[in-house]
Amino acid sequence: MVRLLLVSDLMGFKHYTGLICYLYEKLHADSTILLGNTISPSIVRQLVENCNMRVYGVLGRYDNASLASILIEVNGLLECKSIMVKDVSIYGYGLSGCEPRRVEKIDILVSSIPGRKYTCCTKCSDMVDRIIEYLKPRLIITGGCSRSCQSGNTLSPGRASNGFIGLLNYENGEYVFNEIDLLRVVETT
């Protein structure tokens, strides 16, 4: 089983890094996936160096080359690239403008924005829909949704800047998604 911490739209809020580190360790996550709009490269550096965390990410509309550089440095940039976390294939598509590459098997596609058809919140990009239809992943995880949501095989953790992240347990094509309300975690710790 793979356990992924899903974080979208940190918007440079560095005060969440300690809480994310705590949850990563407490929940025994295998990796953290940043779903765009992280903004601050120092957040990635803190998660990797201070928390010994495996971090992967795609770029959002507010991310720039400095965030891409730090993700490349930690071997975590997922733009039009597939990685394996344990036995689960994860493919990333953000806003870098990269050309998608065909891969044999994709269990999970992560994107910084929802599609128009493949969404659980606001409709956004038909380009994301085309990538999904081309690659045919089993599960789609998007950033760009203000609250956590799920519709069919598409889900979003909600915006960290609004107090939401997610935990995904994935095994053999089956998954369980849990919303994590950061304010409740703070109240109980």
Image: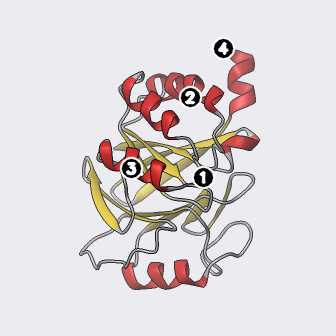
Q: Are marks 1 and 4 in contact (CB under 8 Å)?
A: no
Q: Which mark is residue 189?
A: 4
Name the kind of residue labelled 4 in the image: Thr
Which element type, helix, strand or loop, lies under badge 1? loop
> Toward which corner of the image does residue 4 lie, by quadrant?
top left
**Lower sequence index among marks 4 and 3:** 3
Which element type, helix, strand or loop, lies under badge 3? helix
- 120 relative to 118, above or below: above
- State left or right for residue 6 relative to residue 3: right
**Lower sequence index among marks 1 and 3:** 1
Q: Which residue is mark 2?
A: 17
Name the kind of residue labelled 3 in the image: Ser
Which residue is depicted at the point 43% across and 33% down?
Answer: 45
- Where's residue 59, x and y in %? 50, 58
Name the kind of residue labelled 2 in the image: Thr
What is the CA distance from the residue labelled 2 to the residue labelled 4? 15 Å
Q: Which mark is residue 37?
A: 1
What is the CA distance from the residue labelled 1 to the residue labelled 4? 27 Å
Residue 46, visible in the rendered structure: yes
Q: Nearer the viewer, residue 35 or 12?
A: 12
Q: Nearer the viewer, residue 128 or 27?
A: 128
- State left or right for residue 10 relative to residue 92: right
What is the CA distance from the residue labelled 1 to the residue labelled 2? 14 Å
Which residue is depicted at the point 25% across and 52% down?
Answer: 87
* Tag in front: 1 or 3: 3
Name the kind of residue labelled 1 in the image: Asn
> Toward which corner of the image does residue 109 lie, by quadrant?
bottom left
Q: Are marks 1 and 3 in contact (CB under 8 Å)?
A: no
Q: Which mark is residue 54?
A: none
Which element type, helix, strand or loop, lies under badge 4? loop
Q: Which residue is mark 3?
A: 69
Which element type, helix, strand or loop, lies under badge 2? helix
